[in-house]
Amino acid sequence: MSATTTDRADLLAIVTGHSRGLGEGIAQSLLERDVPVVGIARGGNASLARRFGKTLTQVTLDLSDPVAIERWLSSGVWKQGLELAGTVFLVNNSGVLQPIGPLQTQDPADVARAVAVNVGAVLMLSAAFVAATMEVKERRILHVSSGAGRKAYAGWSVYCATKAALDHHARAVALDATPRLRISSLAPGVVDTAMQAEIRATTTEHFPDKERFVTMKRESRLKRADTTGSAVVDFLLSDDFGSEPVSELPALR
């Protein structure tokens, strides 16, 4: 499938974390291209719902709760749209940054939540997605990763480790060579989201590289969530998608 595909009636995308930030930008770009979206988040997105109506289906789900995820997956309701589509996408965008700081400052409950959202939910949804779409023409899984998965930062041990897990998951899945499945773990660059505000509010004791991100904001070098979301969708729909299991947005390197 190329980026110029015109038969959008045959497509369906699942996007986690569509309620704000980059996830909202990705969902918006898909909807603007007439690709139906199932958005999964703890809260809804009223703006997208007003603009796109029934083309957007919203699911309220806490991705830090594996029991809730399993209950939703077991319900089977989510499979209905997938079974009718020819080409389907799963965009694993949801993620949390906390806990920030060295090990002795990390709350174990925050560690568990980060691993559940950043890794556990992604792997659960990916497995269920592929098992439910064995008859479709093509499946594509996009993990929204980070440069932090490929370069270590002091204070970000949990975030770095969870994003590196997504990269390695994509590498291993690619080796499985599952029929009609493409996968990529994508680092989108530094995007102006609530997570960036969270970084700037962190103390230098917990995150020594804080000033770098403060400077990027001050100098307007952070990428907009909507334009980055559009670039991510360009990549998702392109013929190059999945040619490498770990990738970066070319324009943001």
Image (spheres, helix red, strand yellow):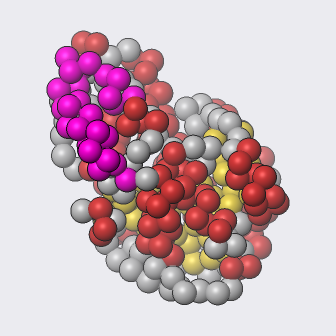
Residue drawn at 17 percent across, 26 percent down:
208
Q: List the single residue furthest toward the right.
A: 54
Residue drawn at 51 percent across, 82 percent down:
3
Q: List the single residue furthest toward the front.
A: 219
- Measured from the top left, where is residue 197 in percent x and y? 40, 32
Q: Quadrant of residue 136?
A: bottom right
Counting labels gives: 0
- Measured from the top left, where is residue 37 in percent x and y? 68, 61
Position of 206 with respect to 185 (left or right) is: left
- Measured from the top left, where is residue 55 in percent x and y? 77, 63
**Residue 56 or residue 117, whichever sits in front:** 56
Instruction: Tell me, yes or no, if residue 133 can be seen here.
Output: no
**Residue 202 or residue 244, whichever sits in front:** 202
**Residue 71 or residue 82, whichever sits in front:** 82
Above/below status of 53 relative to 106: below
Quarter of the image with the C terminus in it: bottom left
Position of 143 with respect to 75 (left or right) is: left
- Measured from the top left, where is residue 160 in percent x and y? 28, 39
Q: Magenta stretch?
A: 198-223
> Is-magenta flag for residue 205?
yes
Position of 73 with respect to 243 (left or right) is: right
Residue drawn at 69 percent across, 73 percent down:
34
Instruction: Tell me, yes or no, if residue 2 can be seen here.
Output: yes
Position of 6 with respect to 161 (left or right) is: right
Above/below status of 136 relative to 167: below
Q: Quadrant of residue 163?
A: top left
Residue drawn at 41 percent across, 45 percent down:
192
> Is-magenta flag for residue 34?
no
**Residue 238 or residue 80, whichever sits in front:** 238
